[in-house]
Amino acid sequence: MKRFGPFVFERRLAPTRTAILGYSLLAIAAALVVMSFIFWAYGVSPVKAYSTIGRTTLGTRFGLMEILRRTIPLLLCGVGLVIAFRAKFWNIGAEGQLLAGAVAATWVALFSGIPAPWKIPAMFVLGFVAGAVWGIIPALLKVKLQVNDVISTLMMNYIMAYFVKWLIYGPWRGPTMRGFAYTDLFPRDAWLPLIRYSKVHWPTLVIGIAAAVLAALILSRTRLGYEIRVVGDSPDAAHYAGISFLGVSLWVMLLSGGLAGLAGVGEVAGIHHRLLEPDHVSLGYGYTAIIVAWLARGSPMAAIITSLLFGLIFAAGDEIKVTLQMPFQITGVFNGLILFFLIGVEVLLYWRVRLVRKGQEWAGKAGS
Amino acid sequence: MGIVPEMSVAENLILKKHHRPPFCRGFLLNLRAVRRFAHHAIEEYEIMTPGPDTPAKLLSGGNIQRLILARELSGEPALIIAAHPTYGLDVGATEQIRQILLEQRRRGAAILLISEDLEELMSLADRIAVIFEGEIMGEVAPETASLEEIGLMMAGEKRGVVL
């Protein structure tokens, strides 16, 4: 029990599923409320803004497809981050791992000379490998040299982003692009198939859903999953049981980085069909996926739902820009608000807060 | 060191054994074997838990202690080092854990019991060695030793080794 002003915090042992769901929805609702002030400051009625967004995203086939397209990279990165977070490996580097995958896919498409039927599979395989390599470096640094994982994974993002910039301004700048900083367009045989009249590159979506199912099975039913959970929950117990931190960290970052790499393959081979500026390849999907994973609370299957939610927010960002003439960066504000409130309600999940007045004890809303 | 709090009772029971058959074949866990082992251990060590899938952190102190004993003793170890095994437990749990230790002694395990509870030492131990400032002051048999004698050794008086 802790005291903070007139409030008393009592430790709660295990939050129920309903409590987790309820408080997560509360956080999202709080973010929506604060967002409405931002709409209001732009001179847009919040009610009109939300109804417009709802109608244009959820209400039309085009809107739904836009949500799905945004969901794909978020799902792949999100599932990977769920795995890493279960081992308490704080991978903030999905963005860079995604870009590494995009670079590998570009190499396969433009420079590898791999024959047509093998091109797309090769893009996915090498994209996974590139993301995994980019993820494994911080894992080695953490276990071998005790380098903080948050810092190293974050910094690796910048290295990869500038590497991509160097490629498109330098050796890979497309001769047919009249001096623009892009690579040439991928040949048609390196384009991912799309759902008709949309930008949904369905092979990547299928891989994303399969990854979520597989990750759930790995965590619950394999020796690796068991060891990941022990390391994440009780490093002392893991040490005592002789579980290898190096092995678990490498595996976790191999999967996490590899899945983010697949997301990068999807973006360049499914949507842009060329490598371009890093912040155009990914609109911060690797960072938003952190919130996707946090909200999923360790469950890869839940990441399917939470990535759809953030896919909706990205799709809404497009609508906000087009219909309401507000900047797309609004989505960043909204994502930030959701993460802020999510971490805020964390306190309520593990602590029961009561208000104690002078002379009397008043039991506050106990929650569930 | 004790348990993995968020993981289930069954998963905690196989810690250290999780990578060996029958619990693990290749890279897959054999969940059926894990459950069977858990049911068996819960019954044998009278672990009070709603079920094998309950998170270990929800158990009471005594039951967590039983869980740890079940986990450690199921491999029939030749040597058991028990440091304050009944510290902070209620009377019932204390008695049961003492019985479990005696059971292991009958089975033939060597037990090094570290405790400050004189009554516990007198009732469980075959030999008592008193340590004062890192040095063994003397060794006595509980049947013949008096509390005064042990008390003097605890205060730092050296006695000749009896056994």
Image (cartoon, coloured by chain):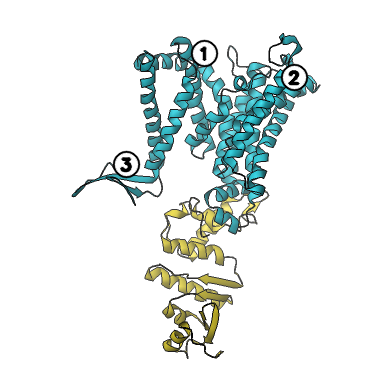
Precedes in sequence: disc 1 or disc 2: 1
Crowd tier of the residue under label 3, counting other residues whose Cα lies within 10 Å: few below 14, some 14–19, many 20 or above: few
* Residue B74 locus on image (x, y percent): 57, 65
Q: Nearer the viewer, residue A359 or A200?
A: A359
What residue is rendered at 59% in x and 59% in y? A240
Q: Quadrant of the C terminus of chain B?
A: bottom right
Residue B103 is situated, as x and y percent measured from the top left of the image, at 52, 75
Residue A292's place in the image compared with A139, above or below, is above
Which residue appears farthest toward the top when viewing the image?
Answer: A178
Residue contact between numbered discs 1 and 2, judged by CB atoms under 8 Å: no
Choose mark 3 or mark 1, whichever is in front.
3
**Type of the residue with mark 2:** Trp
> Residue B30, how many percent across, how many down?
60, 51
Q: Is residue B59 above or below residue A167?
A: below
Q: Nearer the viewer, residue A189 or A331?
A: A331
Res A62 label: 1
User: Which structural element holds mark 3?
Assistant: loop
Residue B50 can be seen, yes or no: no
Q: Which residue is mark 2?
A: A172
Q: For residue A87, which quarter of the picture? A: top right
Q: Nearer the viewer, mark 3 or mark 2?
A: 2
Q: Quadrant of residue B77?
A: bottom right
Residue in front for this viewpoint, A34 or A245: A34
Host chain of mark 2: A
Residue A335 visible, this orientation = yes
Q: Secondary structure at mark 1?
A: helix
